[in-house]
């Protein structure tokens, strides 16, 4: 199968220590999972280290590492190898992780995905739910908070073409990721958004990435900001369903 993520020329292991990826997309629960995993004493999970617009350090690093700052990705981009080497060297725990999304560095996406020394946890979510959550966050400006929402957000008016474009791009990305992992014989752990607050699943992830510790409770302060069903959160929901059926795309959003 033809895919867009090509094997890297540099096959040197990316990290000098046990490492893992949280492969996901926006609103797939990766922020919650990053913070939860950082409660384990032998693991440090960063955010989107290779986002084009910023450097997603773990919140424990206060957004800084040596001469790198969150809002100045240019220095990282100039020498990604040196950057990830410093992140690795500065890590305060024996296991290191990061989040990897679509549109992150092409070079490091290939390096990390083809590196069998880096364990992969693939986070998935219903595409319609992810899109509505993303649009709600954009409209309200609330991306992450420890406070319970004071009121349900206004229903989102869905642009069907934008929804299809978003879903197609994400589907192709996940297909490419899983194809690479299958072709290279790497095992990976697939986790759905609805499972990430399960104590059993969290401990399964902890074991998979190599932690010697287990969770006894789920105690993450991040609060859900989009309560309610999809029917309540989408303006003119029946019309959207009819349009998806007309385009034979309803299966994407079940």
Image: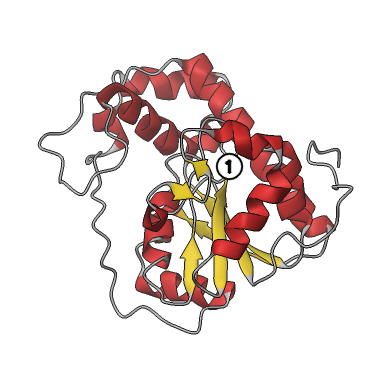
Relative height, residue 149 to residue 85 (above, below): above
Q: How many marks?
A: 1
Question: Taking 190 as reference, is 244 above or below it?
Answer: above
Q: Residue at label 1? A: 101
The residue positioned farthest toward the bottom in the image shown:
212
Give x and y (percent) for residue 202: 42, 70
Looking at the image, the residue that sits furthest to the front is: 67
Q: Is residue 179 left or right of residue 10?
A: left
Is 74 above or below relative to 176? above
Percent across and percent down for residue 86 are: 62, 56
Residue 173 visible in the picture: yes
Residue at x 66%, y 39% (from the top left corner): 173
Q: Nearer the viewer, residue 73 or 115?
A: 73
Residue drawn at the location 37% of the way across and 51% of the way down: 62
Q: Tell which of 235 and 84 is nearer to you.
A: 84
List x then y, in percent, for residue 165: 58, 22
- Can the viewer see residue 121? no
In which quadrant is the N terminus drawn?
Answer: top right
Q: Is residue 197 left or right of residue 253?
A: left
Q: Is residue 254 above or below residue 39?
A: above
Residue at point 73% right, 68% down?
117
């Amino acid at each position: 199968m033809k895919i867009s993520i090509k094997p890297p020329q540099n096959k040197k292991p990316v990290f000098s220590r046990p490492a893992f990826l949280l492969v996901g997309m926006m609103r797939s629960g990766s922020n919650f999972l990053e913070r939860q995993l950082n409660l384990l004493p032998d693991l440090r999970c960063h955010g989107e280290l290779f986002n084009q617009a910023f450097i997603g350090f773990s919140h424990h690093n206060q957004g800084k590492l040596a001469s790198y700052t969150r809002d100045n990705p240019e220095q990282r981009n100039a020498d990604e190898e040196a950057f990830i080497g410093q992140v690795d060297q500065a890590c305060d725990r024996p296991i290191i992780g990061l989040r990897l999304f679509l549109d992150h560095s092409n070079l490091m996406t290939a390096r990390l995905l083809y590196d069998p020394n880096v364990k992969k946890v693939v986070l998935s979510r219903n595409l319609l739910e992810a899109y509505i959550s993303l649009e709600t966050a954009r409209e309200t400006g609330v991306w992450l908070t420890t406070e319970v929402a004071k009121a349900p957000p206004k229903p989102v008016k869905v642009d069907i073409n934008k929804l299809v474009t978003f879903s197609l791009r994400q589907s192709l990305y996940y297909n490419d990721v899983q194809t690479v992992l299958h072709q290279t014989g790497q095992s990976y752990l697939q986790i759905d958004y609805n499972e990430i607050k399960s104590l059993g699943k969290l401990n399964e992830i902890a074991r998979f990435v190599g932690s010697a510790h287990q969770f006894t409770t789920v105690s993450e302060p991040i609060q859900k900001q989009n309560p309610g069903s999809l029917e309540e959160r989408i303006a003119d929901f029946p019309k959207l369903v009819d349009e998806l059926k007309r385009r034979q795309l309803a299966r994407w959003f079940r």
